[in-house]
Image: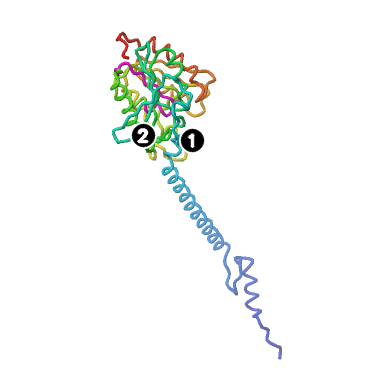
Amino acid sequence: MKPRQIGGDSNAASCARTIDTKCVIPFGCSYISRADSRVACYGEIVRVLRISIVFAVALYLTAMAIFFVTQRSLLYYPSRSYTALADAHANTAFKEISVRTQDGIDLKAWYAPAINKPFTIVFFHGNADGLRTAAQIADTYIAAGYGFLLTEYRGYSGLPGSPTETGLYNDGRAFLKELQARGVESSHIILYGHSLGTGVAVQMASEFHVGGLMLLAPYLSIPKLAQIDFPFFPSSLLALDRFDNEKKIKSIRMPLLIVNGTSDQVIPPSQGKKLYSLANEPKEFHSLSGRGHNDAFDEFAPLSINWIERVCRDSSPLVP
């Protein structure tokens, strides 16, 4: 009698015959067909894709949330300490003045009254400047006899508060009202904004009937600037502070000077040109060849003084 084989030759033979036609992976005597294998493979790919998409969306939403929460730290770079006039090596014509905003913030500014010209220039600086660093901008105007008010924002130069769009507008209003209280007529005020400060200057021009508006390195709006640096975020929906110059410039009717440096790497010169195209007459635009974002002041000063004397002439007597 022939010994019985263990393992089942008949089953093995049956499975072997099946392999050539449809078996891929044996499991006991059960097999997965090539068609079933493809389905399993596609299912695994879909599962991995779904996990990847969920992860990517979660990562994007997290990044967007971080951008939203930290956006003001990306917009404002305030100096944290106050430098007294005596230590700042600023123009000796400057005197420190104090104001209180309508929301109760105590601020300081440096003011040099006009000597032999009817106009006082009110300067709103950029997002990384301060009283000490911006003081030298006033020298050419003071030497020419113009008054100059170097304003400071809440949270900057060691002053109390935190900068926001609404807060900076309150600051600007407080300084202009203080200047008027000192006897300077609104029509004798020339607003001068640089970079971020152009947004404050434009807003003040929309509220006060001043003698002129000068914008150096202006932008259309903060969301449109943010879209350049953060094109993957819906900046127009996320921006807390908008400074929408593009929208406001259309309603401003006063002498306007816009100047851009051709090599500005911070604010595209095209935004200044676009702003100019939207503005009302009388207006003037200048492009400074080879100048960047922070090195145009020396050329801007004589150009702007010439513009004031040509366009902003005023026959009213000098207000001391």
Task: Pick out the residue farthest to the bottom.
Answer: 1
Q: Is residue 69 visible?
A: yes
Write the residue at 53% across / 59% down.
44
Quarter of the picture holding the N terminus: bottom right
- So how many labels did they put on this image? 2
Of 186 and 81, which appears nearest the observer? 81
Disc marking residue 229:
1
**In the image, residue 15 lies at what x, y percent?**
62, 72
Is 279 situated above or below 69? Answer: above
In the image, the segment drawn in magenta is 185-200
Q: Amino acid at mark 2?
A: Glu
Write the residue at 30% across / 16% down.
187
Is 261 situated above or below 36? Answer: above
Q: Quadrant of residue 208?
A: top left
Disc marking residue 165:
2
**In the image, residue 61 lies at what x, y percent?**
44, 48
Quarter of the picture holding the C terminus: top left
